[in-house]
Image (tube, rainbow, N blue to C red):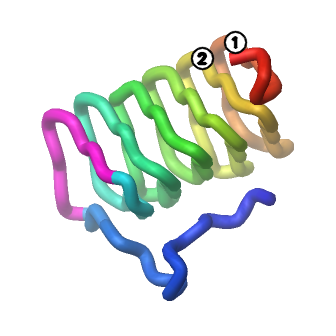
Amino acid sequence: MFKLHTSQDDTVETSIAMNCTLVGTLKTSGNVVMAGRIDGNIEVEHLQIQASGSVHANVHATTCIVHGEVKGSISARNSILVSPSAKVLGDIEATTIRIEQGAFFKGTSNTFTDTYE
């Protein structure tokens, strides 16, 4: 339930490297692994933010796994996982939310069902 979903051939479609900074909107119907930094907005299918990743953006995804830092809201249609190494400053909402022991989270969290949206 909380693994990074990848495409049918089990590959990551987009990767933002550690030394990369993106300013603006990242929008794709695919899967993204973020090790660098983005300032703006993210609209993707599946997002995994690595421990080195820094997101200063609002995130809209189907699933989101956070190991790094997020400053902004996260809205996921299915699930959000905030791992022990993560730091999230912002509101989160999804059908399923898991905040693991050791994670830093400051904001509000809301869960919903598919029919409630």
The residue type indicated by label 1 comes to Thr
Query: Where is 112 relative to 69, above or below?
Result: above
- Front residue of this view, candidates 21 and 25: 25
The residue type indicated by label 2 comes to Asp
Splitting the image into 4 quarters, where does residue 15 fall?
bottom left
- Examine the structure image and report whether residue 35 is included in the region drawn in magenta: no
Q: Is residue 60 left or right of residue 2?
A: left
Instruction: Please report contact status of discs 1 and 2: CB closer than 8 Å, yes or no.
Output: yes
Splitting the image into 4 quarters, where does residue 27 fall?
top left
Image coordinates for residue 107, horizontal then vertical, percent: 64, 14
Q: Quadrant of the N terminus?
A: bottom right
Residue 76's tag is none
- Examine the structure image and report whether residue 25 is included in the region drawn in magenta: yes
Image coordinates for residue 10, horizontal then vertical, percent: 53, 83
Of callouts 1 and 2, the N-terminal one: 2
Q: Which residue is mark 1?
A: 108
Q: What's the magenta bit mostly, secondary-structure-wise?
A: strand
Image coordinates for residue 34, horizontal then vertical, percent: 38, 57
Splitting the image into 4 quarters, where does residue 18 fall?
bottom left
Query: Where is 48 relative to 103, above or below?
Result: below
The stretch of residues the image draws in magenta is: 19-28
Q: Report the residue at 54% width, 72% height from top.
A: 6
Q: Report the residue at 42% width, 57% height from top.
A: 52
Q: Is residue 10 left or right of residue 109?
A: left
Q: Which residue is mark 2?
A: 91
Q: Secondary structure at mark 2?
A: loop
Q: Report the residue at 47% width, 51% height from top.
A: 45
